[in-house]
Amino acid sequence: MPIETPAYLNPSLSVEERVTDLLGRMTLEEKVGQLIMWDARSEDLSFINTRYPGSILHIWGEKLNRAMDMAAKNRLGIPLLVGEDAIHGHSFWKGANIFPTQLAMASSWNPDLLEQVGRVTAREAAPTGVHWTFSPVLCLTRDLRWGRTDETFGEDPFLIGELGAAMIRGYQGKGLDDPAGILATAKHYAGYSETQGGRDASEADISPRKLRSYFLPPFERAARAGVMTFMTGYQSMEGVPSTANHWLLTEVLKDEWGFKGVVVTDWDNVGRLVYEQKVCATYVEAAIVAVRAGNDIMMTTPGFFEGAIEAVRSGQLAESEIDAPCARFLALKFRMGLFENPRRPDLHQAAVEISRPEHRAVNLEAARQSLVLLQNNGLLPLDTRSLTSIAVIGPNADDDLQQLGDWSLGACQHPPEAGKQPREKTTTMLDGIRALAPQGVTVRYERGCSITNDDLSGIPAAVEAARAVDVVVAVVGDHLNFVGEALSTATLELQGGQIALLDALAQTGKPMILVLVNSKPLVLPASAKRAAAILEAFNPGMEGGRAAAEAIFGLLNPSGKLAVSIPVHVGQQPVFYSQVRGQHGHRYADLTQEPLFSFGQGLSYTRYVYSNLRLASPTLARGETARVFVDVENVGQREGVEIVQAYVSDLVTSATWVNKALKGFARVALAAGEKKTVQIELPWEAFQIVNAQAVPVVEPGDFEVLVGPSSRDQDLLKVKMTVA
């Protein structure tokens, strides 16, 4: 008699029917195996046939084909789900497009651009066999010393939510069954960035009210946008590690928000319950805690396998408690169509995708829109009619590794023998200036100093070069030694010999353009603040040098606005704009509390004038949307793009609340002399606070709507309205 095809392999059946059938056929070992994500960097893949993993990471190409073959030969042939850190591009695939970091791209304030970046990343990652990226990061920037500041979208919950949702749409494409899409991950859920002293993964003192006020809104936005996976943070809050937090993972995420995807721990978080945070004595206990908290996939904790099995067999954990997360994960695989098409690597297609000119074009546009002009005394754009020579000086002027930043080959996530992205794929600042300098303009280069040591021997040659030219472009910033997980810094000062270099260059009296290639805001010395122009690039990706050169020579009018405040001094931490009202005084006894550059700031080569701020109605009834109008005029000599920002201030609240909060924005293109009326809609939820009972509410009373080019009070027009 013919062998009957198991129901779970019948694609005409519902997902629920297929999951039920498959789960009924699985042994306890096979179920537990599905809940573990294994690190597949070793050449020994025997764990696939002995531990039955549901997912693996850090594996591509022919090696992945071998792993998929092994999984297919397991008793039930359950396909693998393959994850990878495609963070700002397909990070560790040689030759893939590495985009600006999240912090850089946040300066674009352009959700459409972020969606394109996500789409390109997915198209380049999918044919390498990757199904799942651990991105985007939805943490709020708080203490800038934190080594992962570059991975965030900045300091504002609303902006983070809008950009994160856009990137998720880009990654996930047309839906779960889109073979050119990859699963997105909302991480790190939640509160991971609220560190002590900027130290990575330290205890975060966050109450449920504070979580709901600032840290959870971007994640709720991601859940509503259809993200299919959440990742827990490393830290603990009020004594409870994120991975053990039932309230966070189950009550809020799954029950309250209705999240139907899966929750994955960060790297060995279940193991950390035992050996790092020490809230569990054994892996048996850790397995019980992790499952009952609401985790579905345990990343790289091999000890979970024996621990969970022992927990069930000893009666401490019911097998049905293993069935629930296993069923959720299997349902995801069925919805993705992996049982019919495991989405094997296609290296020919991968080569086609990473070489597409249109992908490179998106990378360049991301770099262009990420640039923020912070200061300009009129030197920029350079008048090339009288220009004869430029000196490009600084340790980050021609360093492709520092320009790409963290989460790229050469960063701390892979050993040095893994290599780095091909040098020819990256246009450094020096490359860009040399390529775009007008004919007849001489470009000299000196590195000047190091960031990683105090060697000043290169400064005399740098000074000599500066004295011999018309203009100096000084490119400084930070280094991968001071960026990333467990690589927080105690200071925000420019490291190595950079301050001495800038001081020496300033003393030459030559006009200086300062270009910052840095993972996070840094404190600038007096010599840097006196520069004729300051261009903030953060880590601008492979096309950063081209974009910066376009701005310097006037081929590009910068439009970026800061998504994070830049402090005067490290002692101002935290310096984000949306401070809670109520402190005594407005400054330190020895220093201003104002940042050097505020959230939302960014200059242009033209000038915009705001006027006639008005509301469609001065009152707002329950559930309504407020419509805000403002006239914006380009009174300069060239076209540009202005980012119009709308903030809300609840004037009297039942619980302390922020002075103002971003609730809307619009990118507006204006020709020279053109005036447009800009409309921004503020939904009912834009007027919410979180009350003392940790409940989001809109309270009746008087509000101000503030609109302008930055978060600074002096830049904002104000209009009052009443919520009835």
Image (tube, rainbow, N blue to C red):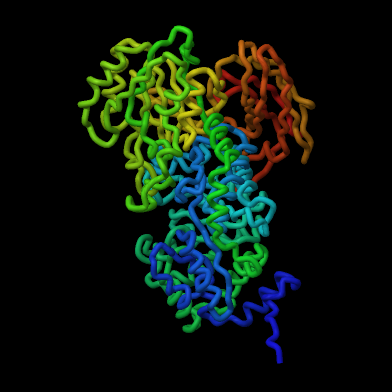
120 in relation to 633, above or below: below
User: Can residue 695 be seen here?
Assistant: no
- Of 351 and 115, the residue lying toward us: 351
Q: Residue furthest top?
A: 386
Q: Nearer the viewer, residue 510 or 164?
A: 510
**Quadrant of the drawing holding the C terminus:** top right
Tell me which residue sits at (47%, 75%) in the image: 51
Residue 706 visible at all: yes
Pinpoint residue 537: horizontal percent, then vertical percent: 46, 30
Q: Which residue is depicted at the point 45% across and 48% down?
A: 94
- Which quadrant of the figure has residue 323? bottom right
Extreme-bottom residue of the structure: 1
Examine the rendered structure and indicate whether residue 506 appears above or below residue 330. above
Image spot of residue 395 (x, y percent)? 32, 30
Q: Percent x, y for residue 715?
A: 58, 19
302 versus 689 height, above or below: below
Residue 618: image x %, image y %? 77, 26
Q: Is residue 149 above or below residue 273?
A: above
In the image, 420 versus 692, the foreground residue is 420
The N terminus: image quadrant: bottom right
Image check: 668 left or right of 497?
right
Q: Quadrant of residue 646?
A: top right
